[in-house]
Amino acid sequence: MNARIPVFFSLLLIILLSASFASASSLSALEGLEMLRKTFVGINDFTAQITQEKQLSLMKRKMVASGEVRFKKPDTFYMELYSPYASRVLLKDNSLILKLPNEGVRQKVTLPPEQGLGRWLEFLAHPVTTVPEGFVIRTMRRGETVQLQISPRKKGVMKELQLFFQPGGELKRLVIEENNRDKTVITFSNMKKNTGLSEKDFQLE
């Protein structure tokens, strides 16, 4: 009887793994983008709590911090991380401002126009019929979660962006891989939609 137990668990593991792989399905880029559009079409703004894990290529350990994000159409995004890695980021279309309050640092970066937030939101404001030029997009669905991978063809700061969301309107995770091998994973929780955010909610000071 005991000799059969390992065999039983081996068979069970094979069945579970097979079911897991079977539950994951590939979608076309158009299907993934259209699902994203439909998911957030009725959301004008949102706030959420986040946990960020950042792995720098020059460091072995991850930097983990909690914080919050805010978003407002048509093109504004704000992220604040609390101590010990305090930082504030304001993205207005393709203009990004970074502030490190503990170090007294303030930097401004201009992203390529095709990577601007406003351009993507304008693109997703209408039914998706074409894939944006300059990007490779892959989509995978596992259960209720959709994974959208976006890779710019033109080499810049970002190597790949992965967006995990649920069609019910929940943003779950964002993964950003940079060409310098830095990697950032942001997990979202307590997401609140259409709370009536104003410009005062997007100040770095």
Image (cartoon, rainbow, N blue to C red):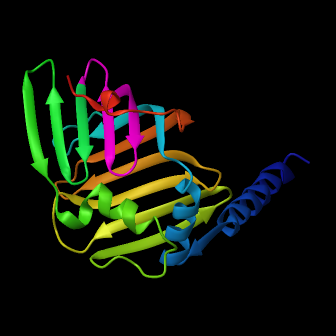
Q: Is residue 63 visible?
A: no
Count of marks, rendered view: 0
Please name whichever residue, 82 or 38, is drawn nearer the observer in this view of the structure: 38
Percent across and percent down for residue 80 are 31, 28
Residue at figure coordinates x 16%, y 30% from the top left: 99
**Residue projecting furthest to the bottom:** 130
Percent across and percent down for residue 8 are 83, 55
Q: Is residue 65 visible?
A: yes
In the rendered image, which quarter is residue 159 located in?
bottom left
Magenta run includes residue 69: yes
Apparent side of residue 139 relative to residue 4 in the rendered image (left or right): left
> Main structural element of the magenta stretch: helix, strand or loop?
strand
Apparent side of residue 32 relative to residue 124 in the rendered image (left or right): right
Residue at figure coordinates x 53%, y 48% from the top left: 43
Asked if 46 appears above or below 136 in the picture, the reply is: above
In the rendered image, which quarter is residue 60 located in?
top left
Asked if 73 appears above or below 16 in the picture, the reply is: above
- Which image quadrant: the C terminus? top left
Apparent side of residue 202 relative to residue 185 in the rendered image (left or right): left
In the rendered image, which quarter is residue 116 located in?
bottom left
Magenta run includes residue 56: no
Percent across and percent down for residue 141 are 60, 64
Percent across and percent down for residue 105 are 7, 27
Q: Which residues are magenta?
A: 63-86
Please name whichever residue, 74 or 86, is drawn nearer the observer in this view of the structure: 74
**Residue projecting furthest to the right:** 1
